[in-house]
């Protein structure tokens, strides 16, 4: 499936490629594979590629003199690559503690969407989410696949300090705060997993195109995993789901 893409000059060194404004798996597949192909074809130019839900920003290491020739080059790449190729993705099981210590918005949130707290946690943990892109904060995963029964606009007044690991729901999305940060999502739990570590390569072990499934853990299990993460002895390979 090919899409009608829009190409525009973002600034003197960058081109923005945009897909139709639809968040779905086919668009994700097309965005990520085109991103991969551009990186291979333009490897000698050392371009930086930044993808989002419906776009790729192509940042060149030099000023663009002839924007039309760059447009034509990118269009040629898109028209000739095999966009039916599957994304090379992994699936991770991420532990979440939904204990009331960490789920301080759960009661008000569940009342707002007219579901019991148990129903909220069941729906949240049974879905398989797709990682569309990483942004806002280093290691913040933008996930698609939230059950529509859990949709709720973000808070009218954001919290000043959402704790690292907080699992929240905002609008049609769910995600994990990778560090302490202000935020307006409804917090329903916390994960002890370190999603971003600048000392590791890559700093974030999850990438766009990967899948996430949350599973519930007790408070004692949370403390145990947290201790292992802090002491650098947690085996992150245990999170990977093998087919």
Image (cartoon, rainbow, N blue to C red):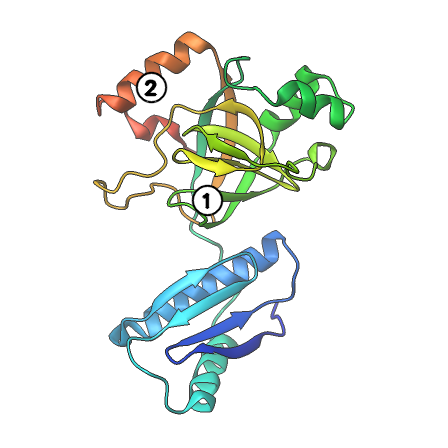
Q: Is residue 197 left or right of residue 37?
A: left
Q: Nearer the viewer, residue 137 or 7?
A: 137
Q: Position of residue 17 (x, y in %)?
A: 51, 72
CA–CA distance between discs 2 and 1? 23 Å
Q: Nearer the viewer, residue 230 or 101?
A: 101
Mark 2 or mark 1, earlier in chain: 1
Picture quarter with the C terminus: top left
Q: Is residue 120 left or right of residue 232?
A: right
Q: Is residue 32 visible?
A: yes
Q: Residues within 10 Å of mark 1 (few under 14, many from 20)?
A: some
**Residue identifier under label 2:** 226
Foreground mark, 2 or 1, reads 2
The total of numbered circles placed on residues is: 2
Q: Position of residue 10 (x, y in %)?
A: 47, 75
Name the residue at 42% across, 51% down. 88
Q: Is residue 10 left or right of residue 53?
A: left
- Outermost residue on the right side: it is 114
Q: Quadrant of residue 109?
A: top right
SS for callout 2: helix
Q: Is residue 215 above or below residue 171?
A: above
**Residue identifier under label 1:** 210
């Amino acid at each position: 499936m090919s899409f009608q893409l829009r190409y525009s000059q973002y600034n003197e060194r960058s081109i923005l490629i945009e897909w139709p404004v639809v968040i779905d798996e086919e668009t994700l597949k097309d965005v990520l594979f085109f991103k991969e192909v551009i990186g291979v074809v333009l490897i000698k130019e050392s371009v930086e590629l930044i993808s989002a839900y419906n776009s790729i920003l192509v940042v060149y290491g030099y000023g663009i003199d002839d924007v039309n020739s760059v447009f034509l080059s990118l269009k040629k790449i898109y028209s000739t690559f095999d966009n039916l190729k599957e994304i090379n993705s992994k699936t991770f099981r991420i532990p979440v503690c939904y204990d009331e210590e960490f789920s301080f918005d759960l009661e008000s949130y569940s009342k707002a969407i007219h579901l019991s707290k148990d129903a909220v946690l069941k729906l949240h943990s049974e879905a398989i989410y797709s990682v569309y892109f990483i942004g806002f904060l280093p290691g913040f995963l933008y996930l698609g696949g939230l059950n529509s029964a859990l949709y709720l606009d973000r808070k009218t007044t954001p919290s000043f300090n959402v704790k690292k690991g907080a699992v929240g729901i905002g609008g049609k999305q769910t995600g994990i705060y990778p560090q302490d940060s202000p935020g307006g999502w409804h917090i329903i739990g916390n994960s002890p997993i370190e999603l971003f570590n600048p000392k590791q390569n890559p700093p974030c072990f999850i990438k766009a195109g990967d899948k996430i499934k949350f599973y519930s853990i007790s408070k004692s299990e949370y403390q145990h995993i947290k201790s292992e993460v802090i002491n650098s002895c947690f085996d992150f390979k245990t999170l990977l789901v093998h087919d």
